[in-house]
């Protein structure tokens, strides 16, 4: 398929050929861009103040123009255009190359046009720069039209031309078109080089066609094009990211067999993948092998290993690796420190995490957002909210912008400490700073207001969330419905459930269980039973919690026969009762003075490895006190329950 821009470019290229004296007037132009490109390959490749101004631009070019900015580039170009004699095309190309490296593609193209209008003709280097800029825009059709202009001017496209176009095609995902262009290259007697190979391999990997990339390397090497570590890098990276570390290790062996020497970057890809797979022993073994071969580890090697050990809670090993890299004078970066700090925080070692933070500052490594987030999280977990807020202010003062995770952590800390209003104030301040709230932030605050009894505020916040275009998750709905049901607003909860159905949102067993629980608490046992029985018709699979809540509701109404029947059905359906199931039924039968059934349930519960909970023991102790039970009943209670009973005496 050819888009409008390519059609326009095709016309430009065709016009260029019509104006070329090398082609006869009655020559028949190929009818599509790809035929034209093939034709091009087959046909073409076979055969006083002025002095001051001049001194000024030459001095500027000599002094270096790396990283030149837009205004500076335009001023320099204008100075060159006004100079007499005019600068050479080589000087202009130096400027355009520097600008292209700073991604000022549109400006380069505009200045190239101005230069030509001022009587300075493009040469092949200028045209290659223009092709690169069009490819990066990306406007591939115009890039190919520049190739047509190149032919009109009598220049033969070189390998740079082809490789630039190849890269442009690969960046757009048009890998098969890129392969066709390589075939055209070969027809024009241009031998593909290492850049060609690496460009195609990278393009194939971007399309996740790893096996084809491997085959391409083999074919190209058979034709005398020697691959290097950069050829294999994208393939190894793609293999590792897709979880095929074993294949990556096999490919590494093939690399070495083909005399391609892996560098530290190659080993880092494998080590990082092994660490993420949890294969830490293999990662360490690979690390030792690397060093044996004389390849020195760098900060990325150590950071991957430290991150791997920290992710499985082996912070001691991570800390030892940090000491080892410092001993080797390898400077840890922010990621290295952050991995360890986060690990210490998660195991409750906030003091050690703060020591690492201080060491980080001492070494001149600037903490990043992840570092601050970990420390703020640790402070919130220890309810040191004032210090957490100070840490937030500190990161802002250091020029490190808090993200939505930062604010969500601190808001959650306020909500858990029953300071939900303070959390709301921070939420508003966050919005003023331009940080957009996400589902987690809203859900945290909604839960905080529900738990603090401010249900109306929670509902208002939910409506704000929807109006702001932030989609509530199932967890958000669960939090709000739970709050409504806990406050006796079951009808409103049912209204929200109906809206979920209309919006094609699958509530799942968790939401239905919340509603059933709310109905039971509101003494709407029959409604709860009807909803519970309808779950299978809705395609919703019940779980042990939904059974336990329905059992509890039936027991609350003293419908023991129905509860016993549900208990049997539960086991028939393959759901194993847990301690909550047994204790709920035992208490119900004790209240109904059905001692025999209670005894049977206690014995069964003990055989399943469960014991009576505090509520069951309290009922037994009350019944013993009132004389409804004799003391021998205590002998049936398990060990832990006897300890509870003793504490109640």
Image: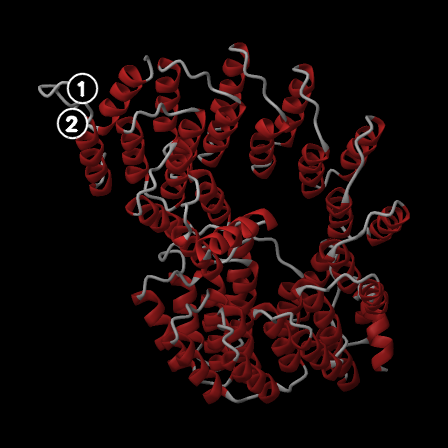
The answer to which of 232 and 51 lies nearer the viewer is 51
Quadrant location of the N terminus in the rendered image? top left
Label 2: which secondary element: helix
The answer to whether residue 368 of the structure is visible from this angle is yes
363 above or below 158? below
Q: Residue at x 53, y 56 (%)?
A: 570
User: Where is residue 284 shown, x and y percent of the image?
Assistant: 81, 36
Label 1: which secondary element: loop
Give the left or right position of residue 428, taking residue 527 as reference.
right
| Contact between labelled residues 1 and 2, with CB atoms less than 8 Å apart | yes
The disc, 2 or 1, on the residue closer to the chain's N-terminal end is 2
User: Where is residue 406 shown, x and y percent of the image?
Assistant: 62, 71
User: Where is residue 250 shown, x and y percent of the image?
Assistant: 65, 22
Give the left or right position of residue 49, taking residue 278 as reference.
left
Residue furthest to the front in view is 48
Residue 427 disc label? none
Which residue, given by chain and number where applicable, does mark 1 sit on?
23
Q: Which colour scheme is used?
A: secondary structure
User: Where is residue 509 shown, x and y percent of the image?
Assistant: 47, 61
Which residue, given by chain and number where applicable, does mark 2 sit on?
18
Q: Please rate how many residues cluster around mark 2, counting C-alpha atoms within 10 Å: few if below 14, some from 14 to 19, many from 20.
A: some
233 above or below 483? above
Q: Please rate how many residues cluster around mark 1, counting C-alpha atoms within 10 Å: few if below 14, some from 14 to 19, many from 20.
A: few
Q: Distance of mark 2 from mark 1, alpha carbons?
A: 7 Å
Q: Residue at x 27, y 16 (%)?
A: 43
């Amino acid at each position: 398929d050819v888009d409008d821009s390519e059609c326009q470019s095709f016309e430009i290229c065709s016009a260029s050929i019509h104006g070329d004296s090398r082609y006869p007037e009655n020559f028949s132009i190929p009818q599509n861009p790809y035929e034209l490109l093939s034709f091009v390959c087959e046909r073409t490749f076979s055969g006083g103040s002025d002095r001051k101004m001049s001194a000024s631009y030459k001095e500027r070019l000599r002094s270096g123009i790396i990283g030149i900015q837009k205004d500076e580039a335009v001023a320099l170009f204008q100075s060159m255009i006004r100079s007499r004699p005019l600068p050479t095309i080589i000087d202009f190309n130096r400027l355009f190359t520097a600008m292209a490296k700073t991604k000022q593609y549109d400006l380069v193209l505009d200045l190239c046009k101005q230069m030509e209008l001022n009587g300075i003709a493009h040469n092949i280097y200028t045209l290659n720069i223009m092709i690169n800029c069009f490819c990066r825009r990306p406007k591939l059709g115009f890039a190919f039209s520049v190739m047509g202009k190149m032919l009109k001017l009598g220049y033969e496209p070189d390998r740079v031309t082809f490789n630039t176009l190849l890269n442009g095609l690969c960046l757009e995902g048009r890998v098969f078109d890129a392969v066709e262009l390589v075939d055209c290259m070969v027809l024009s007697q241009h031998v593909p080089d290492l850049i060609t190979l690496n460009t195609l391999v990278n393009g194939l990997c971007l399309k996740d066609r790893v096996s084809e990339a491997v085959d391409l390397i083999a074919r190209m090497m058979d034709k005398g094009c020697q691959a290097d570590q950069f050829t294999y890098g994208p393939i190894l990276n793609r293999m590792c990211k897709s979880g095929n570390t074993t294949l990556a290790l096999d490919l590494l062996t093939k690399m070495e067999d083909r005399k391609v020497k892996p560098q530290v970057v190659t080993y880092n890809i494998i080590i990082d993948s092994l660490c993420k797979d949890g294969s830490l022993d293999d990662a360490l073994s690979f690390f030792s092998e690397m060093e044996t071969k004389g390849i020195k580890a760098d900060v990325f090697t150590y950071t991957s290993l430290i991150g791997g050990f920290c992710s499985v809670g082996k912070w001691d090993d991570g800390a030892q690796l940090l000491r080892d890299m410092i001993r080797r004078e390898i400077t840890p970066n922010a990621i290295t420190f952050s991995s360890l700090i986060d690990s210490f925080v998660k195991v409750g070692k906030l003091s050690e995490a703060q020591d690492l933070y201080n060491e980080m500052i001492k070494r001149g490594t600037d903490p990043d957002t992840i570092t601050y987030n970990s420390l703020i999280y640790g402070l919130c977990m220890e309810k040191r909210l004032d210090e957490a807020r100070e840490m937030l202010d500190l990161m802002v003062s250091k020029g490190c912008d808090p993200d939505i995770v930062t604010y969500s952590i601190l808001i959650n800390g306020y909500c858990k400490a029953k300071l939900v209003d303070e959390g709301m104030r921070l939420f508003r301040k966050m919005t003023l700073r331009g940080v957009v709230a996400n589902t987690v932030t809203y859900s945290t605050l909604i839960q905080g207001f529900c738990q603090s009894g401010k249900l109306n505020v929670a509902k208002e916040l939910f409506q704000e969330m929807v109006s702001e275009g932030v989609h509530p998750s199932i967890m958000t709905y669960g939090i709000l419905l739970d709050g409504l049901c806990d406050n006796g607003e079951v009808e409103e909860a049912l209204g929200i459930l109906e809206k979920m159905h209309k919006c094609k949102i699958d509530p799942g067993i968790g939401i239905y269980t919340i509603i059933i629980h709310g109905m039971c608490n509101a003494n709407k046992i029959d409604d709860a039973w009807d909803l519970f029985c309808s779950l299978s018709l809705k395609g919703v699979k019940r779980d042990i919690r939904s059974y336990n809540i329905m059992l509890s509701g039936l027991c609350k109404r003293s419908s023991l026969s129905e509860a016993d029947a549900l208990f049997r059905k539960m086991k028939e359906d393959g759901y194993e009762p847990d301690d909550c199931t047994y204790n709920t039924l035992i208490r119900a039968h004790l209240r109904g003075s059905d001692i025999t059934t209670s005894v049977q349930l206690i014995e069964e519960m003990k055989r399943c490895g469960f014991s009576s909970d505090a509520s069951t023991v309290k009922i037994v102790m009350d019944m013993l006190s009132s004389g409804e039970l004799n003391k021998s009943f205590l002998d049936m209670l398990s060990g832990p329950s006897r300890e509870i009973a003793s504490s109640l005496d």
